[in-house]
Image: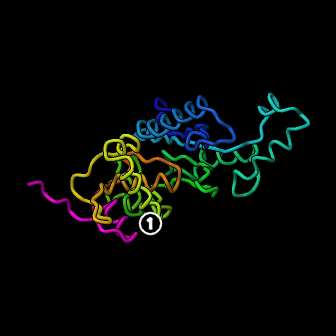
C-alpha cells in the first residue's frame, strides 16, 4: 500500500476479551494475544496515517463459527451458544455475516476519515452491556480529549480550527459515585500502590479536594473511568488540566484547586 501511494484500509480482528476478563471463559493467553493486536492497530494507524492508510479493529464478543464444533458436542452446540446470548444487548450471539458486514463498513469509503478505532462490544460492570465505537476525531469533542500529533492528509473545518486531531474519551459514562470509589481506592492503597496499580502519577498543578483530603485529579478521574467502563486509560490519553480532568470533575460537582506551592 505504501509503495503504490494510493492509501488503503486495514482491519484487524481483535476481541472483547482483550478489554474485559470474563469469568465464564477464564483464559489468559488469548486475551494477551488479542491485546497485543489492539496495540499494534493503534500504533500502525499513527505510523501509516501520512500515507493515507487507515488501520482499525473490530473486537467482537461471541460469534457463532465452526471453531466451537471442535470442543462442544454436536447435540449441545446450539444450547451452549445460546447460553452466551446475554453477553450482548441484542440478546443473541453474533454471526459471521454480522462480523463481515462490520469489517466491510470499516474498509469502505464510508469510513474514509476513521482510523485508530476499535469497534467493540464490551461487557460493563454490574452486568450492564453496551455496543460502542470510539468516535471519529471529527465528532463532538467532550471535555478532556487529548490532542494527538497532526497527520498528513485531508482535514475537516474543526481540525483546521484546532490544528490537531483529538482522542475521544466518553466521560459521560463516569458518575460521581465512580469518582468517589476511585478516591476510596486511593485512600485504601496509598499513593505509591495506587499509581502502580492504575498507571498514573502524582499531580503537579491541581488537587481534587474531597472530605478534607487532596487527591491527584487526573489519576482519580482515569481510575473512575476504569471503574465505570471496565476499560483502562493511559495517562497520555487525556489532559489533566483545565482542558481535561479539571473540567470533567467540575461538571460532576467536585472541587479542583490549583496545587498549593511547597514552601
Q: Is residue 251 magenta?
A: yes
Q: Nearer the viewer, residue 260 or 40?
A: 260
Residue 40 spot, x, y in % from top left: 48, 34
Place residue 97 in its image quadrant: top right
Measuring from the top left, give residue 105's x and y in whole percent: 63, 49
Farthest front residue? 188
Residue at 56% from the left image edge and 53% from the top image edge = 133
- Secondary structure state at the residue bearing disc 1: helix
Quarter of the image containing the C terminus?
bottom left
Nearer-the-camera pick, 189 or 202: 189
User: Is residue 26 toward the left or the right of residue 117 in the image?
Assistant: right
| Residue at image point 51% right, 32% down | 36
Rendered location of residue 258, percent (x, y): 20, 62
**In the rendered image, the vertical position of residue 208 relative to residue 24, given as above or below:** below
Please give the name of the residue rendered at 80% of the width and 43% of the height, measured from the top-left corner.
81
Range of magenta residues: 241-263
State the residue position of label 1. 176
Amino acid at each position: 500500500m505504501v509503495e503504490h501511494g494510493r492509501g488503503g484500509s486495514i482491519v484487524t480482528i481483535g476481541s472483547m476479551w482483550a478489554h474485559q476478563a470474563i469469568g465464564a471463559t477464564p483464559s489468559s493467553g488469548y486475551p494477551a494475544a488479542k491485546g497485543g493486536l489492539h496495540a499494534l492497530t493503534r500504533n500502525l494507524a499513527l505510523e501509516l496515517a501520512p500515507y493515507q492508510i487507515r488501520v482499525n479493529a473490530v473486537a467482537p464478543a461471541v460469534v457463532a463459527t465452526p471453531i466451537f464444533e471442535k470442543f462442544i458436542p454436536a447435540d449441545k452446540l446450539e444450547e451452549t451458544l445460546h447460553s452466551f446470548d446475554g453477553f450482548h444487548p441484542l440478546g443473541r450471539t453474533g454471526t459471521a455475516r454480522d462480523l463481515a458486514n462490520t469489517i466491510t463498513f470499516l474498509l469502505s469509503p464510508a469510513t474514509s476519515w476513521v482510523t485508530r478505532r476499535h469497534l467493540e462490544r464490551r461487557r460493563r460492570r454490574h452486568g450492564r452491556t453496551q455496543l460502542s465505537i470510539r468516535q471519529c476525531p471529527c465528532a463532538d469533542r467532550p471535555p478532556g480529549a487529548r490532542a494527538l500529533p497532526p497527520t498528513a492528509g485531508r482535514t475537516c473545518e474543526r481540525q483546521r480550527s484546532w490544528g490537531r486531531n483529538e482522542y475521544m474519551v466518553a466521560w459521560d459514562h463516569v458518575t460521581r459515585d465512580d469518582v468517589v470509589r476511585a478516591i476510596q481506592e486511593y485512600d485504601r492503597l496509598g499513593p505509591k500502590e495506587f499509581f502502580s496499580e492504575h498507571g498514573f502519577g502524582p499531580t503537579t498543578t491541581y488537587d481534587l479536594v474531597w472530605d478534607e483530603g487532596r487527591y491527584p485529579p487526573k489519576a482519580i478521574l482515569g481510575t473512575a473511568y476504569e471503574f465505570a467502563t471496565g476499560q483502562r486509560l493511559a495517562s497520555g490519553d487525556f489532559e489533566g488540566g483545565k482542558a481535561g480532568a479539571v473540567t470533567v470533575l467540575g461538571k460532576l460537582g467536585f472541587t479542583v484547586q490549583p496545587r498549593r506551592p511547597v514552601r
